[in-house]
Image (cartoon, rainbow, N blue to C red):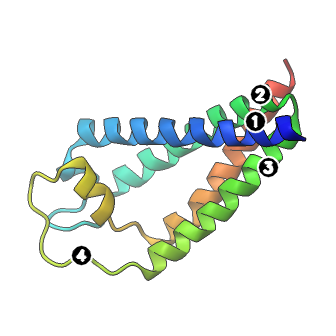
Amino acid sequence: MLRSILGAIAGYVVMFFFIFLAFSAAYLAMGAENAFVPGGYDVSTTWIVVSFVLGFIAAVVAGYAAAAIGKGMTAVKILAGIVLVLGIVSAVAVAMSPRPEGARTADVPNLEAMTKAQTPLWVALLNPLIGVAGVLVGGRSRKGK
């Protein structure tokens, strides 16, 4: 059981770093003008699509890592539960977050973009489901090896 817990934790750490690096690179590549709607902090449709793709890939990699380290699907199931719970907590935070005041300037640093971005609630609610699906896909792909 300890191995499964360690596998789930390792999978989550992998997911965290993958998301941080991939989303930072995507933001730098896209720039504020493509990541946000003009003049505001609402994320663009392009950003939503990119975030779904990157989030799914991150979850697949994390599920694979959890299965490899945990030596089975128990670690993957634990990780899927963690992703679901934290995703729901994140969706609640999105629903309760105040809108930033003022217009967005053309050049927004990465950290400021992360803290002020306004994600639609439906996206925040869909993200945990995409994450759970990705974790299970990644875990099952490792299971066959």
N-term mark: 1 or 4: 1
Alpha-carbon neighbours of circle 1 within 10 Å: few (<14), some, or many (≥20)? many
Q: Could you tell me which residue is drawn at 66 percent across and 54 percent down?
A: 83
Task: Give the CA separation, mark 1 to mark 3.
Answer: 9 Å
Task: Give the CA separation, mark 1 to mark 4.
Answer: 38 Å
Q: Quick check: 142 above or below 95?
A: above
Q: How many marks?
A: 4
Amino acid beneath label 4: Pro
Res. 43 visible in picture: no
Amino acid beneath label 2: Ile
- Tell me which corner region of the image, top left, top right, bottom left or bottom right, holds residue 98: bottom left
Task: Give the CA separation, mark 3 to mark 4.
Answer: 35 Å
Q: Is residue 28 left or right of residue 69?
A: left
Per the image, the residue denoted by label 3 is 78
Q: Could you tell me which residue is drawn at 9 percent across and 61 percent down?
A: 105
Task: Give the CA separation, mark 3 to mark 2.
Answer: 13 Å
Which residue is nearer to you in this view: 6 or 127?
A: 6
Q: Could you tell me which residue is drawn at 69 percent across and 42 percent down?
A: 9
Per the image, the residue denoted by label 4 is 100
Q: Are marks 2 and 1 in contact (CB under 8 Å)?
A: yes
The percent position of residue 38, horizontal first and vertical second, equals 17, 62
Per the image, the residue denoted by label 2 is 69
Amino acid beneath label 1: Gly
Q: Are marks 1 and 3 in contact (CB under 8 Å)?
A: yes
The percent position of residue 139, horizontal first and vertical second, equals 78, 34
Amino acid beneath label 3: Ile
N-term mark: 1 or 3: 1
Q: Secondary structure at mark 3?
A: helix
